[in-house]
Image (tube, rainbow, N blue to C red):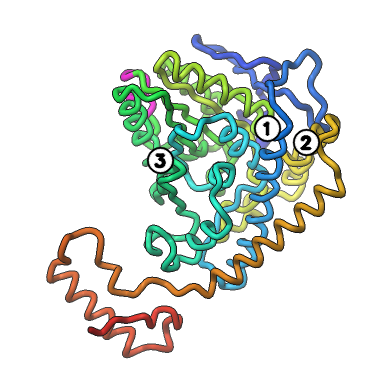
Amino acid sequence: MKDRNHLSRVNVSHSATIIENGLIDIPMLQLLQADGTPHKDATLPDIDKETALKMYNTMQYVRVLDERMIAAQRQGRISFYLACTGEEASTVGSAAALQDVDMIMSQYREQGTLAYRGYTTEQFMNQMFSNEKEPNKGRQMPIHYGAKELNFMTISSPLGTQIPQASGYAYGQKMAGQEAITICYFGEGAASEGDFHAGLNMAAVLNCPVIFFCRNNGYAISTPAEEQFAGDGIASRGLGYGIKTIRVDGNDIMAVYAATQQARKIALAENCPVLIEAMTYRLAAHSTSDDPTGYRSKDEEEKWREKDPIRRFASWLQQQGWLDEAADQAHVEQTRQEVLTELKRVEKVPVCVIDEIIEDVYDTPPWHLQEQLRELKAHISKYPDAYPKTSGRINNG
């Protein structure tokens, strides 16, 4: 992997192969070429028009959401945002291959999985604006989504913590006799955390029905893959722990869908973990706090734009006669208006009353938290111009 193009040493395969014995070069499953035409002799997964269009529309929705929320952050309307531009096929394709009973444990770039399961624009906005309608009462920073009703575990900021948690949750599913698995998303940078190794070893030893889904997008913030590790990506690590492993073209949604379908089938039938390494690229900055021009070139980005996952899938859909270009553009514009309308509406929703900041942990908040709350109220009252007007929802009773 000693190349800025982290696919440089990857061989393309047209069938999903579960690798149980070590290989020098691990093949990559790819079904659709960059122009949307299937590879010769490639076997595409059985997929109906309704599912295919839902996958495509979800990818379009997420890209529009990313565009609008990055703009909102630049305008000072929200404090932070993480886009998944260029990686939509990895998150949406894998989500489409799951069942609703399956638990999703996310890193922070998987808004596509939530959108596919039905998380609404209003819910996205409530979370990012940290208002009183957000289930976590605004205690999480933006993009830390959670939806119990959708089996989507709330995102946590520390990197990699969800990996051993996923192993434990999947072990619980097995012990309870559930016909369900857990999928755990993370980037190749998170695979450098100790939690990655602990989580994979735990899952392998205890035979946990969990899919470890690595989005290898080439960079851990500003650190390129070749400076993170010397081995053959993340797939080789799965082999080291005795885990069945698939490497897939993360910009080919059909390949991701097929690989995840197979991984789920195996994880459930054999009560074992499966590792999927999706080779993709982060076209956007790491976050709105990042400037990628400091560590990568425009030429590199443009080469990957030619492999755009949305354009690739759109071409395939058009070849099937399932997508009309004019209707598609109209739908994108409608989505853009929906996101913008909800953004304008939800940003006016007030935040929680400040007293709630010390609730929901203790039956009765202890004296030291009550004292800190009084000091906080006094501070805000003394310097009202230094805080947003919504911070003025103070109960002085």
Residue 368, percent across and down?
15, 70
Mark 1: which secondary structure?
helix
Identify whether 161 is placed above or below 201. below
Judged from the image, the secondary structure of the residue bearing numbered disc 2 is helix
Pick the front one: 326 or 373:
326
| Residue drawn 70% across the image and 35% down it | 50
Is residue 46 depicted above or below 98 in this figure?
above
Q: Position of residue 126 (x, y in %)?
A: 49, 63
Mark sitting earlier along the chain (2/1): 1
| 2 or 3: mark nearer the eye | 2
Residue sticking out furthest to the left: 367
Extreme-top residue of the structure: 21
Q: Which residue is mark 2?
A: 312
Q: CA distance from mark 2 to mark 3?
A: 31 Å
Q: Amino acid at mark 3?
A: Gly
Q: Residue at x 61, y 38 (%)?
A: 92
- Kind of element beneath mark 3: loop
Look at the image and say whether residue 256 sits in the magenta stretch: no
Give the residue at mark 3.
Answer: 160
Q: Quadrant of residue 54?
A: top right
**Identity of the residue drawn at 82% across and 26% down:** 37
Q: Position of residue 88 (x, y in %)?
A: 64, 42
Viewer-nearest of discs 1 and 3: 1
Asked if marks 1 and 3 touch (Cβ < 8 Å), the reply is no
Mark 1 nearby-residue class (10 Å; few <14, some 14–19, many ≥20): many
Q: Is residue 54 above or below residue 256?
A: below
Q: Read off the residue under disc 1.
A: 253
Magenta stretch: give its range.
Answer: 199-206
Q: Is residue 161 above or below residue 78?
A: above
Question: Across the whole image, how many numbered discs are drawn on residues?
Answer: 3
Q: Give amino acid for label 2.
A: Arg
Label pair 2/1, CB-CB below 8 angstroms: yes
